[in-house]
Amino acid sequence: MAGKALRWERRPDDRPHELLEAALKVFAENGYRNTRLDDVAEAAGVTKGTIYHYFDTKEELLLSAIEHYQALAFGRVEGVLQDVHLPASTRIRLLVRKMFSVRAPSSRYLLALLVRAAAHEVRRVHDTWLRDGPVKLWGLIAQLVEEGKDRGEFRPDADGDAGARLLVSGLMLQLIWQQHAAAVPALAIDEDRLIDSTVELFLAGLRSSAPPIAYSSVD
């Protein structure tokens, strides 16, 4: 514990940030129901009283940890989104790679926690994560598709919203499933291949050279 305590000799403003990092790891590894604030305190090198100094409940701590995680993730792509000189296809490639190429195991566990358990155990946290995570991401991708359509890079009838939803949710699920590849070998796939190939398939369906979509009604 002595080594951990040294981190807390920094100014107090650093403490919430490091508490959230520790909480993120513990929640991701143990799940919400099985996580005790004592576990988070031990991982952060503080007392449980320190946690209560910043957060009133375990749910509030989880929500703050999720918001912290999402802020870091979307912070990595701000430059890509603002660089309007790049083609829309290039920005989509960079956006998806930066958002999904996170090799920290806790990121995968966190996604699994939110998708499976948190939806039932802490619905408010799960709904917030959906709104500010996946929904926000596919909204950004759909916006880039619209920019590409305006510039003639993508065909005008392309449904960017529907495509972006499938792109984001499909990648998320496949990456979560990689945790189970040892037990079910058919799930295993190189993550770089998965991400890059999925984006290229997505972009191929948007390009103006692709045939228009024919919609049919079912009587």
Image: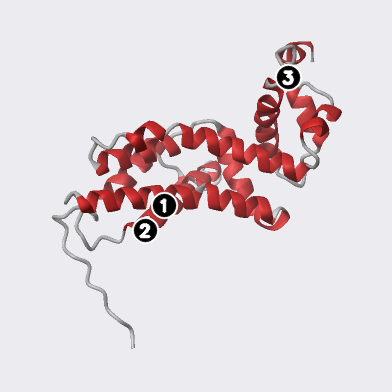
Q: Residue at x 77, y 32 (%)?
A: 54
Mark 3 burial class by Cα count in 10 Å: few <14, some 14-19, many 20+: few
Label 1 sits on residue: 139
Q: Quadrant of the C terminus?
A: bottom left
Q: Toward the viewer: 151 or 3?
A: 151
Query: Is residue 117 visible in the rendered structure shown here?
Result: no
Q: Residue furthest bottom?
A: 219
Q: Quadrant of the N terminus?
A: top right
Label 3 sits on residue: 12
Q: Residue at x 37, y 43 (%)?
A: 194
Label 2 sits on residue: 161
Q: Residue at x 67, y 39 (%)?
A: 64
The residues tagged by marks 1 and 3 sit, at their Cα atoms, a distance apart of 36 Å
Check contact, mark 1 vs mark 3: CB within 8 A. no
The residues tagged by marks 3 and 2 sit, at their Cα atoms, a distance apart of 43 Å
The picture quadrant where one finds residue 159 is: bottom left
Q: Residue 88 in the image: state x and y as whole percent.
A: 26, 43
SS for dot 2: helix
Give left or right: position of 52 versus 213: right
The chosen color scheme is secondary structure
Mark 1 burial class by Cα count in 10 Å: few <14, some 14-19, many 20+: some
